[in-house]
Amino acid sequence: MFFEFCNLIIPTPYILALLAGVLYAVAALLIKRSAEQGVGVWRIAFVSNITIAILFQSLWFLGGELPWHLWWQPVIIAFGFVAGQWLTFLSLERGDVSVATPVMGIKILLVAGFVTLFNGETLRPSMWVAAVLATIGIALLNRRGGAEHRNVGFTIITAGMAAATFALFDVLVQNWSPAWGLGTFLPLSIGLGGILSLSFIPRFAGPLIQIPKPAWPWLIAGSLAMGLQSLIFVSTLAHWGQAAQANVMYSSRGLWSVLLVWVVGHWFRSREQLLGGQILGWRLAGAALMMAAIVLVLSG
């Protein structure tokens, strides 16, 4: 009865997308703490992917079909999952985080575009406005002030390709999952993605056994949180669809990240609370736009 009542106020897929956004913000803080202890982005990506792949195997108990004539669908999803992460971490490693994060925010608009292009869905105008507001909100939430940027062109290209890859991933999961069922398509796809993540190993700063011992608790906790949010969000897309709406709700992770940094960031030795008033102003503006985008989605 309680959940039915909640669903009348906010549809279940929206609640789950918001929850995934909160968990992502928590995971980001934990993983950033491990990165500060010398883990390196590629070892973080590998451990996170293996954790995600293991967690997705829990869906097998839900059951489903095995239409082997569609074997290529989970293969494409697996490659999309790993390629999107490869491009993301390549952008973060060789590019500029303050440029990459806002560029990857265009994923919201790309999802809306792909849904219209591939599915023939006609999104209401307010949904497009929400997507634009959320994209701008992400950019404002990630402003870093007047810091110099490096490899801007490379960052924009790789981050943009990552956004497009993940947007296509979301729409294809929504479209292809029904033929298989939640309990087969995702465990197969993400499990294969975990295997493909072995391609990250040549880029490691050193073997996994060389990761500093103090970093492991942060890395494991962050990877589990990242895996759980991925399980919730991707399963939501597979079961309910509504990729465009869910992505606006999920994009609130930028807002939750900023709030967590300001409230408990000192527990993680984050120094972002010390940023100046101008940056705080931009982030408040970004938060306002993000909330407006969420209200527009809920009003539908």
Image: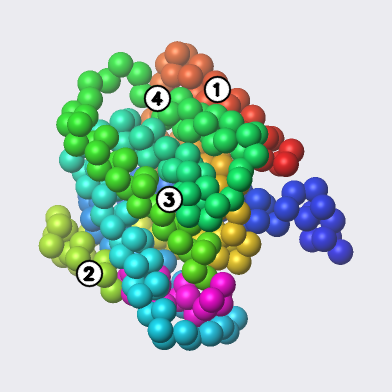
Q: Name the residue under label 3.
A: 167
- Image disc number at residue 143: 4
Q: Mark 2 points at which residue?
A: 198
Residue at the image position 22 percent from the left and 69 percent from the top: 198
What amino acid is found at the position of numbered circle 3 in the picture? Ala
Instruction: Looking at the picture, tell me which residue is in the foreground, 196 or 37.
Output: 196
Q: Is residue 152 above or below residue 250?
A: above
From the top left corner, tell me how far across and down residue 208 is, in percent: 21, 65
For label 3, count other residues whose C-alpha is less than 10 Å away and answer few (under 14), some (14-19) or many (20+): many
Point out the frontmost of discs 1 and 3: 3
* Lower sequence index among marks 1 and 3: 3
The single residue placed furthest to the top in the displayed view is 278
What amino acid is found at the position of numbered circle 2 in the picture? Leu
Q: Indicate yes or no whether the magenta region holds residue 185.
A: yes
Spatial CA span between label 4 and label 3 = 23 Å
Instruction: Looking at the picture, tell me which residue is in the foreground, 88 or 66.
Output: 66
Spatial CA span between label 2 and label 4 = 33 Å
Spatial CA span between label 3 and label 2 = 23 Å
What amino acid is found at the position of numbered circle 1 in the picture? Leu
Q: Are marks 3 and 2 in contact (CB under 8 Å)?
A: no
* Lower sequence index among marks 2 and 4: 4
